[in-house]
Image: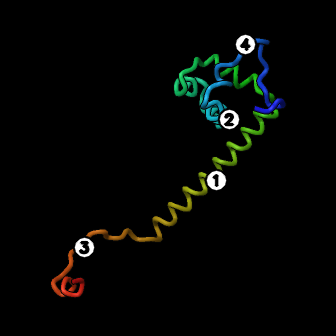
Amino acid sequence: MSPETSIKQRPGRKSSIATHPACVEIEFACARGISLRRVAERFGFSRASVDRHWHALPSEHRSRLVGLATELDRHEARIREVYAALAVMVPPTHRHRSIGASEHAHAA
């Protein structure tokens, strides 16, 4: 973490979330609006720890994460729309079809 995005904490005490390997995922989950309880359960922290960590981040950092999460959600929604449109346009293919005697002779 860069100095401008460092977490406010008491001297000598390190945040267990700030040093966790999944810190970025935890922060991004909070930015996406996933409940703090669910984030805490998923990563094995207390809800209070996640709340303290999230609210200790500088507001500019939190705002930037929320903006990125919102943008990602928009892109994911658009991708789902495109896949749905493609599914309607492209008929399913048949993977297994029986080869008739004449086709079998040509295949050999």
Describe the element under mark 2 as helix, strand or loop: helix
In whole angstroms, how far apart are the C-alphas of marks 2 and 3?
49 Å
In whole angstroms, how far apart are the C-alphas of marks 4 and 1?
39 Å
At label 4, the amino acid type is Arg
Residue named by callout 3:
97
- Give the residue displayed 79% in from the left and 27% down from the top: 6
At label 3, the amino acid type is Arg
Describe the element under mark 3 as helix, strand or loop: loop
Note whether 34 is above or below 85 in the view shown: above
In whole angstroms, how far apart are the C-alphas of marks 3 and 1?
38 Å
Note whether 44 is above or below 83 in the view shown: above
In whole angstroms, how far apart are the C-alphas of marks 2 and 1?
16 Å
Residue at the right extreme?
A: 4
- Give the residue displayed 79% in from the left and 31% down from the top: 5
Describe the element under mark 1 as helix, strand or loop: helix
Q: Is residue 10 left or right of residue 38?
A: right
At label 2, the amino acid type is Ala
* Dot label at residue 31: 2
